[in-house]
């Protein structure tokens, strides 16, 4: 019964993060490149660092599926055609960033109530990799979509977001430290359980 409850809770948490990612769409600062500064990538990285790779990835798949079905969760009108816009690369980056940060952090455990140096280091690395992958995928897709040079794509697709992402990176680490042991009580109550050993 405990295993079934934990499994159910994991999908509930994944759905909650998908909703948070979607709602964060309403907080944005427009930029000339056409992709605004948003809080969205903060919650995307948190989905991975708090839930681990599998359930963090599930939350992103829910979010992306909603947008591709036309539900207004993207910063521009959704549907499959969104991949023909500059946003397409960032959408791929959202999934890659969440998965990568989740792989580095793994499923949370209740023993993480104490912030050990190793955990803090993993969270710093995971958060940095998550944010970096989002922007890198976006820049590479801009280069492909608009036949830009690599330097021009970096200047257009990464540089404008460095300051904002640095702030969100700094915020994401203490948030993950606080949220992981809380989430663990519901999604991984048995630290020695199968899912934890698998590194989900």
Image (tube, rainbow, N blue to C red):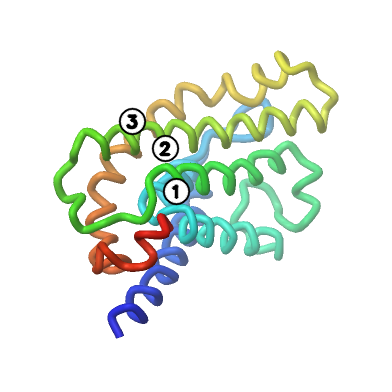
Q: Quadrant of residue 160?
A: top right
Taking depth in this image into account, of 140 and 105 the one nearest to the observer is: 105
Q: Quadrant of the N terminus?
A: bottom left
- Left or right for 106, reference 58: left
Q: Earlier in the sequence, mark 1 or mark 3?
A: 1
Query: Residue placed at 75% from the left, 58% from the top?
Result: 79
Query: Residue placed at 46% from the left, 66% from the top?
Result: 15
* Residue 71 higher or lower than 102, as above or below: below
Residue on which disc 2 sits: 126
Residue 122 in the image, given as x and y percentages of width and height: 34, 37
Q: Earlier in the sequence, mark 2 or mark 3?
A: 2
User: Is label 2 in a helix, a strand or a loop?
Assistant: helix
User: Is label 1 in a helix, a strand or a loop?
Assistant: helix
Residue on which disc 3 sits: 170
* Residue 58 higher or lower than 177, as above or below: below
For the view shown, which residue lies furthest in the top direction? 151
Residue on which disc 1 sits: 102
Query: Residue placed at 59% from the left, 60% from the top?
Result: 61
- Left or right for 117, reference 6: left
Number of marks present in the image shown: 3
User: Is label 3 in a helix, a strand or a loop?
Assistant: helix
């Amino acid at each position: 019964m405990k295993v079934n409850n934990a499994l159910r809770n994991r999908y509930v948490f994944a759905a909650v993060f998908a909703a948070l990612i979607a709602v964060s769409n309403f907080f944005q600062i427009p930029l000339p490149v056409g992709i605004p500064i948003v809080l969205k990538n903060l919650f995307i990285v948190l989905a991975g660092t708090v839930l681990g790779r599998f359930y963090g990835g599930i939350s992103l798949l829910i979010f992306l599926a909603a947008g591709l079905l036309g539900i207004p969760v993207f910063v521009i009108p959704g549907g499959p055609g969104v991949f023909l816009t500059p946003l397409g690369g960032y959408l791929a980056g959202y999934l890659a960033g969440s998965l990568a940060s989740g792989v580095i952090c793994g499923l949370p455990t209740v023993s993480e109530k104490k912030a050990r140096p190793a955990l803090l280091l993993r969270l710093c690395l995971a958060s940095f990799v998550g944010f970096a992958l989002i922007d890198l995928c976006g820049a590479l897709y801009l280069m492909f979509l608009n036949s830009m040079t690599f330097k021009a794509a970096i200047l257009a697709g990464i540089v404008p977001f460095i300051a904002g992402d640095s702030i969100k990176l700094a915020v994401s680490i203490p948030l993950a430290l606080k949220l992981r042991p809380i989430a663990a009580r519901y999604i991984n109550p048995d630290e020695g359980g199968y899912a934890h050993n698998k590194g989900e």
